[in-house]
Image: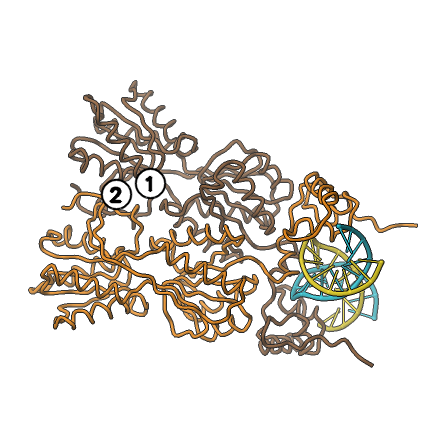
Chain colours: A brown, B orange, C yellow, D cyan
Amino acid sequence: MTESVKPAPTGLGQSTLADVAALAGVSTSAVSRTFTPGASVAKKTRARVLEAAKKLGYRPNAIARTLSTRKSRIIGVVVSYLHNQFYPAVIERLSQLLQAHGYHVLLFISSDSNSSDDGMDSLVLDILQYQVDGIVLASTVMSSRLAAHCQSVGIPVVLFNRVAPVEEASMVTSDNIEGGRLAAQVLLERGARRIGFISGLEDSSTSQDREKGFMEELARHRKTLFARISGEYDFGVARAATRELFSQKKRPDALFVANDHMAFAVMDALRIDLGLNVPQDVQVVGFDDVPQAAWGGYQLTTIEQDSELMTRATVAILLEHIESGAATPRRVVTPVRAVIRATTLPL
Amino acid sequence: MTESVKPAPTGLGQSTLADVAALAGVSTSAVSRTFTPGASVAKKTRARVLEAAKKLGYRPNAIARTLSTRKSRIIGVVVSYLHNQFYPAVIERLSQLLQAHGYHVLLFISSDSNSSDDGMDSLVLDILQYQVDGIVLASTVMSSRLAAHCQSVGIPVVLFNRVAPVEEASMVTSDNIEGGRLAAQVLLERGARRIGFISGLEDSSTSQDREKGFMEELARHRKTLFARISGEYDFGVARAATRELFSQKKRPDALFVANDHMAFAVMDALRIDLGLNVPQDVQVVGFDDVPQAAWGGYQLTTIEQDSELMTRATVAILLEHIESGAATPRRVVTPVRAVIRATTLPL
DNA sequence: TTGTACGCGTTATCAT
DNA sequence: ATGATAACGCGTACAA
């Protein structure tokens, strides 16, 4: 009689649980248990299984496991741009921490074409198809409808570096408002009289909050803003904006710039395009979005964020939701402080 | 008689093909075909399916699809560090291009703990568990045993920015040798007499090739190297190495630095620690590992790489292997050129 | 402790 | 064009 013979483990092509079981002369469940940390297997069978597995070069299939357990151990991470200095370091750390817990990062870049709300939504729906266990949204918008959907299917979402009116999602941000206040304090202490602000993207919560704190503190000292312009979190735009700001007769003598990336552009504009001295002619305070190692040639007072703390908080929240099944969203606001940074000579 | 009733689509929890099929009053195959681009479905049923799907908020399960089709549409990308400026931009672009083709990036950071050969191998085995369709190894080592394994299971591997004696893998690199030659030409044209070289990590092929081309060109001009020291591709190490190099009576008057990240450190050392003028006292040539936007305060002649071209080549190779089933590995060497770069005043 | 059998959600094969 | 049914590889009750 003919038996339906499974094609022998070819050598080419992954071998499976069944292959290992056959070779070891045990059942598939025995093999499965061998590769399940807290399972009960007899030493002897365990050994035989491991031997067979090694012989076949067996590696468990994470996809099949996901289908069966409904846990992918994949975290979807969405980021708008990687060339803006701040996120690469965060993603690296995030990935490291998650890997240490057996999770992996599926990366999504929300480029121009889908940076709109709708595009964003469809991108997240993309992610959902991969049955991710959690989602980190780094500085990107997300419709509340979508957040609700994630909530309903039990997928924790962490908004990183962005607050938004989304009840269902957790959020991790720096204390941008306090940072704005600190910036104002620094400039006022240094005797600034005509104070300007160069904003980031107008619809970003980070820029808004930094401005908010800044204005609050100015108001508290009965001070008013001398000038304001948007730099759109862009190097070139910020440089042009600075020239624009200084094209009038009455010029600012102090600037708060919504992030360091732009602050560098501002200093280039001041020194190169306008021939001014920094900080003699103009005081500049930035906001730390650029890792120390990337600094060059600039000395700047900056409001320093604790990206390590932000990252750890993000991971902690994610794991808490995933593994402890906690449902209530959490909000974490990490502290900031004003520091002077430079890798080169003060000019 | 009792029928085993499937729990109705709960609203919570993803709805499945079967749910949609039930609601639309068709078979699961009909639904499947509706979501398969090139399938034959009657307009009428298609409409009913789509309506039911929308009503249920149905999204196909990519994991289940992977199990069935044995194509995950996931590309594993391994990178050692993200804070070294060069890779974030590459990964961003890589992810964009792959997304445009319906692929996604599963990110792996090979941090210190697993940067050894063994650690690296186990990391790649990790990747294999996710049934990735392809692997990009950005500047990390990989044992040939492992490469052979990938080959045997039919997973294309591209070594990015790193050549290695691995027959089975494709490789994409800049023309580092030619870049080294160019660097030598530039320095010689500028009348350099005592020429020093600051290497990257000694076991990295990029640093080796840059040095090789550099030495070749010097030899062709009957010139010899005045000094050599390792900067280990690290900012701090390079800065210290530079001080070391200049602690002797006879000092170099020209330096070729294996990448820009270190070149910045070198210039800081020269100007700040040693009080020298650049380029009056010392000529410096770097090698472009840092995106333009991250430059600040430095003016430098650098050997520019075409990271866009490198990325496109990587994607092209990957797709060629995956979708056309091409088996023979490919080698791509992208051109380089010497340019002067700065975002601020020459000092 | 071990094995059997079913389910996870999808695609593929083969009739109809 | 459509529908039943068998994989895909693994976890896991349940039974032995």
Looking at the rendered structure, the secondary structure element under dot 1 is loop
Looking at the picture, how far across and down is residue A299, in whole percent? 22, 41
Question: Callout 1, which amino acid?
Answer: Asp
To which quarter of the image does residue A37 belong?
bottom right
**Above or below: residue A79 compared with residue B207:** above
**Above or below: residue B288 compared with residue A175:** below
User: In the displayed image of the protein, which residue is found farthest to the top?
Assistant: A222
Q: Is residue A140 left or right of residue A129?
A: left
Question: Callout 2, which amino acid?
Answer: Arg
Q: Chain of mark 1?
A: A
Q: Is residue A91 left or right of residue A340?
A: right
Can residue B173 be seen from the camera position used here?
yes
Looking at the picture, how far across and down is residue A80, in whole percent? 44, 43
Which of these two is toward me, B96 or A339?
B96
Q: Mark 2 — residue? A: A341
Q: Mark 1 — residue? A: A288
